Image: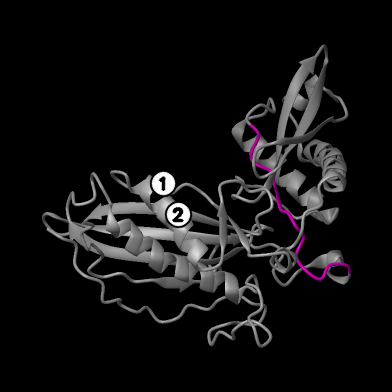
Amino acid sequence: MRRSLGWMALLPLLLTACGDLPQPFRGNPGGLAGRLAVPPPYRLAVPTPDAAMLSATESEAFARAIAQALLKREVPAVAEDPLPLDWRLKMDMRLEGSRVVPRYALFDPDGAPQGVAEGSAIPARDWARPDAALLAEVANDASRRAADLLLRAEAARKSTAPSALTAAGPPRIYLLPVRGAPGDGNESLTARMREALGDQGILAQDVADGAGFAADGRVNVVPTRPRMQRVEILWIVSRRDGQELGRVLQMNEIPAGLLDRHWGDIAFAAAAEAAGGVQRVIENAGGMPAREGGGQQAQPNAAPGGLALPPRAAELPLPEPAR
């Protein structure tokens, strides 16, 4: 018979993504605004290359220059590590005699290759000590190659916006494996969250393809009082264009070592509450199907543009963990 376990204090918080996270397109849609009713169906991440034959500082500057050049071509791009639903551009350089030849590879959110292009050759002596002008010139060439790769990929597989996804069925969310939990927490929380999201009318999947949203679960355990520890579970909900929509934070102080082996019903309770928070974030962002009677249920904390504002934290009367 299953023991009745739970959290003695579970604080679900819906947090907006209005902190210091980069959001380069909010309020500044540029030339795309007149042609797109929804944000672009992808965001392109340009991580710092590790095989560009440059120093660490130069590699970072090169990635930033490419992202800026892509923005000028109206391609949503950021010079940072990719989020779960981001496309990504990988770069490397190879030496051919007295020339350096760039190569750019495009990958979709699941890591599947979408195309490779070579850039214009660069004199090796110039690339050994590149100045700002040379980096900008090569970055502009790279942006042209990357934009062409994206156009070809889009022609082969048309991405759709979250609003279009809901018209064809339930919203789809890319559920990343939970990480950071002790014991069997990563596996248990991931499995229970998949089930709980289904109860909320959200289809959870383990690949990014076709998903309009992503949920990234992270667990942190820190000691507090003697023989006690605080467990923090953070679920980050993002949209297909890379924008973070909200966060669901759960916290609980428990006896130290209680979760070092099996999570049991604690995973059920935590996932059930977190799934409700994730559903609310997606609904506030306009991603849930319309209810019978017309429209989506109005949220009292919905902000203009569909982003969730943080409600008050509420302590839920769940039972204490069994000892």
Q: Which residues are magenta?
A: 35-49
Please state which amino acid type lies under the numbered disc 1.
Arg
Q: CA distance from mark 2 to mark 1?
A: 7 Å
Q: Quadrant of residue 97?
A: top right
User: Which residue reaches farthest front?
Assistant: 1
Left or right: 244 with respect to 251?
right
Q: Nearer the viewer, residue 56 or 256?
A: 256
Please state which amino acid type lies under the numbered disc 2.
Gly
User: Which residue reaches farthest top?
Assistant: 97
- Residue 153 appears at what percent x and percent y? 82, 43
Left or right: 196 with respect to 290?
left
Asked if the residue under mark 1 is in contact with the one under mark 2, i.e. CB atoms within 8 Å, the reply is yes
Confirm whether residue 295 shows in the render: yes
Assign the C terminus to one quadrant of the image. bottom left
Instruction: Please tell me the numbered disc located at residue 179.
Output: 1
Residue at image location 81% in from the left, 23% down from the top: 101
Indicate whether residue 40 is drawn in magenta. Answer: yes
- Residue 110 appears at what percent x and percent y? 64, 42
Residue at image location 59% in from the left, 60% down from the top: 238
- Residue 74 appears at what percent x and percent y? 83, 57
> Helix, strand or loop at disc 2?
strand
- Residue 165 appears at what percent x and percent y? 71, 63
For label 2, the residue is: 217
Indicate whether residue 182 is drawn in magenta. Answer: no
Q: Quadrant of residue 283?
A: bottom right
Residue at image location 50% in from the left, 54% down from the top: 216
